Image (tube, grey):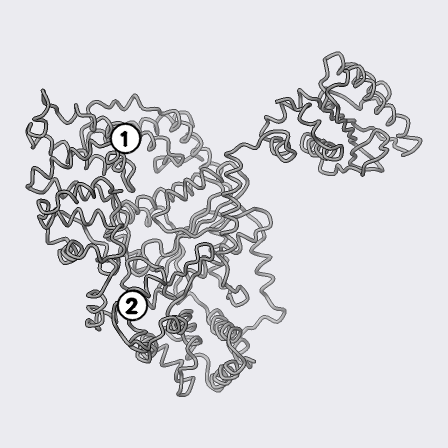
Amino acid sequence: MDIGIRADGLTTSDFEEFALEIVKKKFNNTKLHGFKEGKDDGIDGIDDVLSPTLLIQAKRWQVTKSHTTAVSLLKDEIKKVSINKETKYGWNTNFRYVIVTSMGLSPDDLKKVREYANEILPGSMPSDEYILFSSTLTMMSKDIEFRNIFENYGLVEKNISRVLRKERLNSIEAESKSYFKGFDFNFFVETDFLGRAYQNLQKEHILLIQGPAGIGKTTTCTMLGNLLLNNEQNEFDVIVRKVEDIDRVLRLYNTNYKDVERNLFVIFDDFLGRNKFDVNERILLDIKKLYSASKYTNNLFICLNSRTQIIQDAKLVNFEFQKLISEDFTEGKNFIIDLEKYSSIDKAHIFRKAFERKLSVINQDAQHELSGKYEVLRTHKWNRIINHRNFFPRSIELITNNFEDSNENFYDYVLFTLDHPVKLYTNLFDNLKIEEKYILFSILLFKDLPVKEESIKRAFNTLDLSSDFNFEKALQKLDGSWITSVKNKLVGETKIDFLNPSIIDFLNDKIEKLTKMKEKIIRNAIYLDQICNKGNRHLGTNMELADVDFFKRLLNNWDIFEDNEYYIGEKLTAIIKLEKFDDNKGEFLKLLGKYDGSWRMSKYYNGWSRVISEIYYSDNDELKQCLINSIENPVVMESILSSNYLDLDILDEIVSYLDTMVDGLSYGIFSDKKYNYEFTEMDIYFKFRDKKISLLQDFLDDDEAEVDDGVDVESEEFNSSTEVERQLKRYTEKINVMLSSGYNWADIDAKQLDYSGLEDNITSNLKNMSYHISYSDDAYDLWRESQIEVDIPETIEDILDKPLL
């Protein structure tokens, strides 16, 4: 690309600005500045007009002019500086003189200009680097340090991957800002937890926050994100993701953040399940992968939070997760919020701020009512409230949100609510209309939250309740006390979620007691999402472990369910389990042809594995023959190979089933052919084999290649080359196990895989382990100082015993 020709397209002022930017970067001189257009005495840029160290002359040059003319003109510019440096400007100091021109210069031209400059301005051009012309500018345009300058002035085309990266980063930046909408930091109470969490996060890069429901886990994560986003020394983006998105998060990081001076903070809220342990073993392994990523990167920060009881349940179910928590999430990374660790002063601030927050969002009449009720509290001792065993931030928020429902003495109301936290929900629930209760239960029974408002309305309308009931007004009434709505203006859609997990706990308990209401919703359901078993259960092959009633209803009433397109895998399974293949052969084959491998009955599950296993365990040979024939269709094969949650183990399982089925079918399946095949001689086998190799290579190429536990990079005996060799050997042994344990891939040689990427990643990760940057800054200290008042309250009474208005 000819920079000289392209630069001719710039205006004079644009070329001068371009030259300034280039020289600033090349000579690391940020003080350089230019002048308006006009007579310049040979100077287009300078770093200090009284005592300069660097001067710039920018010459945009028409390609039609001769080299001789160019050299003469450049000499004239140098001469102007020589004449005026003492007589006009009084410069006695030595300075360097840089020429930036779009013209091409020969070696002889370059020699003439430098000799002339050093003759009349001694020492001003000590090397060829002080004359930037077309060929040197061309080389600079390919240098990553300078490329963005050339791109900004349109002298080179922008790299498409960088353009896409910028667009993605802009999108993430917008998401970061929107995450904090609705969170009023004026009413946030800083506790010692936040300071320690902030410091530990910067040091460890990953943090696990656990505690009971309503203690403030999500709020703490939100405040951590705000502190990082307002970090003045380092740029941060803050996003919230679900635990099933771990692979996407790591891909996002590797694509957009790994080689840039920008940081990513990811919050995984309720990462093990919102109200109960609700993830499978594969996701727990992904969490371990996430931990490794934080260990080997310098600008990725992770915050996980969950209820303590759910973490305990996960540890009981999965040994690897138990090991991860006990061995890797040590004190600095495992942050437990305990009610007993809140000081009385902390709780007093929380109590006061909750009332102030409510006061800020209600009308004047309600403000006077709330203020009057607060005055009742001031006539009593504060200790019984503040030191109550059930004092949780969410409990106090519940009290303030529903203050209007307290008819009795407000002090007694507060204590009663703390003594019986569930009874406040019970009283509120009992005062709801029957239709409003049905709305809440209808939302509760949907498989995933949030739910589209339109879906809730359609589900509710099937219940045939009062014709005078106004659904929209009911949602407005429930909004803010039971539910919350999120509007997506881009697609014109509103989704509904519950206000907090405690409400879900309460409603789950309530619906089990109000069985007739639950049965009515399920009986009239037009969404499979409402009748699908929501538990995280084992999906085995035995009939008693499956939801037989669900499969029967799905099969018998398929057309009435408005979300049936998401349940193709379940319908295929229902046909097999209920032995309805002979009656539904045509539809079965049609569904196989368009199935994408999803499985709605359980998150994080590969549906193809379930369907193929059901066929494997069936006694219907024709069904097995249909499966093999279908998989020979490239569309079906591609669906299997690209389906979600297809990993090395699942692939082995599928291939083992198919191999056994082909062998068991004897040769009947190939009766129309002249000779017989073994499974390993079929085309479909080789496609599965290619996928196995691809997954193995992905495993080896993983940027977060895990270094064996126990490596001490600070030890005097540590040798990087020796350690890399040891780790490579360990990975080779892993590959050999992967080739023989689940399915014997006798024709794949582990040595034929490419280990170069693995070697680079291990080397890089060992280096990062020895130089793990901790972003130490004073952002937290500055924020904390801004929160501290001149007169710091020292007692509960100082904080609480003052009028609310």
| Figure quadrant of the N terminus | top right
- Residue 404: x and y in percent read 43, 81
Instruction: Report whether residue 213 is seen.
Output: yes
2 or 1: mark nearer the eye: 2
* Amino acid type assigned to the residue bearing label 1 in the image: Lys
- Quadrant where the C terminus is found in the figure: bottom right
Q: Residue at x 19, y 65 (%)?
A: 523
**561 lies above or below 478:** above
Q: Which residue is mark 1?
A: 691
Q: Measuring 52% from the left and 74% from the top, which residue is drawn there?
A: 356
Q: CA distance from mark 2 to mark 1?
A: 46 Å
- Which mark is drawn over residue 410? none
Residue on which disc 2 sits? 460
Measured from the top left, where is residue 200 in percent x and y? 47, 51
Residue 185 lies left or right of residue 481; in this view the side is: right
- The amino acid type of the residue labelled 2 equals Phe
717 left or right of 46 in image: left
Task: Write the residue at 41% across / 31% down.
Answer: 761
* Earlier-in-chain disc, 2 versus 1: 2
